[in-house]
Amino acid sequence: MLEEGKTRLLQIAQKLSTRKDEVGRTAAGYALLGVGEAYLYQGLPEQAEVAYRKILAEPEGIHPVVLAQGWYALGVSLYRQRKYGQALEAFEQVKKIGEVGEGIVLRSLALGNALPERAWMWQAAIWSRLGDAERSLSALEQSLSRPQRLAGSRNAVLLTQAQKWLEGMRRVVARSKEREQKLAELRRVASQIEQHLPANVSPSQSSR
């Protein structure tokens, strides 16, 4: 079924590729979104990335909703390929579109509202993968800074889970700071020991 769906959607995208009006360009973009999603379901993020980049290569005339979803889906496909730096940039584009026209972006057909907030959450996951707990915590805090944008039944589970992630990451950062304080104290003690002990022992001293 996925193969049949991809074939049909690719045909639609190809048929509409010569259109210059917003309706045609947007419809072609939606078709390519479907192609990419099918690839992701098949566990083929590399091919999904190709479909999403086709949308974003020529953004003129495409509705911001489709562009936002294209960047978002591109970020997911890159994340699954462990291309974390590029994924961070893709999710950043989602947030930028949200700043320009949040009333449009927040009502994504595929994901409901709060698309930029979801982008922050993905970035939190990336920073965790990269071992930067403080940046991950900051991203989670940003994603929940306006909880009203996560209102609605479609986001209820996500909101609850994100709050748990936030609590957990705060504990991780707190423990990390405690370790840093302990290491700093150990280094201070080591420095004091070094200052009060001679660096070398001369042969005459060692023979006494």
Image (tube, rainbow, N blue to C red):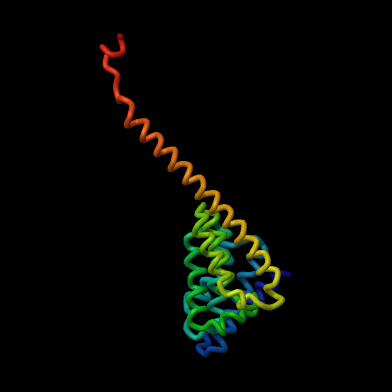
Q: Residue at x 65, y 73 (%)?
A: 7
- Furthest residue toward right: 1
- Residue 198 screen position, x and y as percent: 30, 25
Residue 80 falls left or right of residue 57:
right
Which quadrant holds the N terminus? bottom right
Q: Residue at x 68, y 67 (%)?
A: 160
Above or below, comparing residue 146 to residue 182 in the picture: below
Which quadrant holds the C terminus? top left
Residue 1 falls left or right of residue 189:
right
Q: Residue at x 26, y 11 (%)?
A: 204
Give the camera-side residue of 81 and 121. Answer: 121
> From this viewpoint, is residue 50 visible?
no
- Residue 159 screen position, x and y as percent: 66, 69
Q: Quadrant of residue 145?
A: bottom right
Give the camera-side residue of 165 and 105. Answer: 165
- Residue 33 screen position, x and y as percent: 60, 74
Above or below, comparing residue 184 to residue 193 in the picture: below
Above or below, comparing residue 186 to residue 89 in the picture: above
> How many labels, in total?
0
> From this viewpoint, is residue 63 visible?
yes
- Furthest residue toward top: 207
Q: Residue at x 53, y 89 (%)?
A: 22
Give the camera-side residue of 25 and 184. Answer: 184
- Residue 187 screen position, x and y as percent: 41, 38
Residue 130 falls left or right of residue 156:
left
Give the camera-side residue of 96 and 25. Answer: 96
